Image: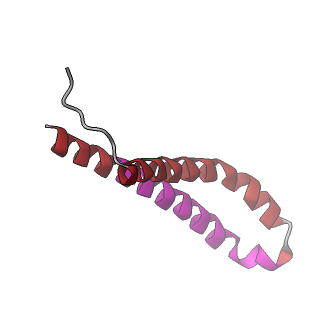
Amino acid sequence: MSNRRQMSGQEMIQLVWGAALLLMGVAFFFRIPLIMEQVAEIEHFDSVRIFLHIAFYLMAIILAGGGIQKLYRFRQTREDTDG
């Protein structure tokens, strides 16, 4: 028999939200080279191309990091309440 309790609706939302953040961060990370090719075609952005590159990668890292943090906290709260 298991002592595991059922997941509440709020906990399920937090779990899904964390997974979505992580997946979007990873997906965005791999999409950045394609976006930068399109940005390179616009002459107006020539002077800030490096800044955009750094900003896009930073955004991807923040998204993935937020998802990882949310999933880690979810795991910690589940372990605290189960054990």
Q: Is residue 44 left or right of residue 53?
A: right
Residue at 17% of width from left, 45% of height from top? 80
Q: In front here: 63 or 36? A: 63
- The colour scheme used to paint the residues is secondary structure
Give the position of the C terminus as an image quadrant: top left
Q: Residue furthest left?
A: 83
Q: In front here: 35 or 41? A: 35
Q: Count every numbered label the image shows and give the total.
A: 0
> Is residue 83 in the magenta section?
no
Q: From the viewer's perspective, is residue 46 above or below residue 5?
A: below
Give the position of the N terminus as an image quadrant: top left
Instruction: Examine the residues drawn in magenta and state their main secondary structure.
Output: helix
> Is residue 46 in the magenta section?
yes
Q: From the viewer's perspective, is residue 13 above or below residue 44?
A: above
Percent across and percent down for residue 14 are 40, 53
Percent across and percent down for residue 50 are 65, 69
Percent across and percent down for residue 47 are 73, 78
Percent across and percent down for residue 74 are 31, 48
Residue at 18% of width from left, 44% of height from top? 81
Q: Is residue 81 left or right of residue 36?
A: left
Residue at 18% of width from left, 38% of height from top? 82
Q: Is residue 19 left or right of residue 83?
A: right
Give the magenta part as a residue range: 44-71
Residue at 21% of width from left, 25% of height from top? 2
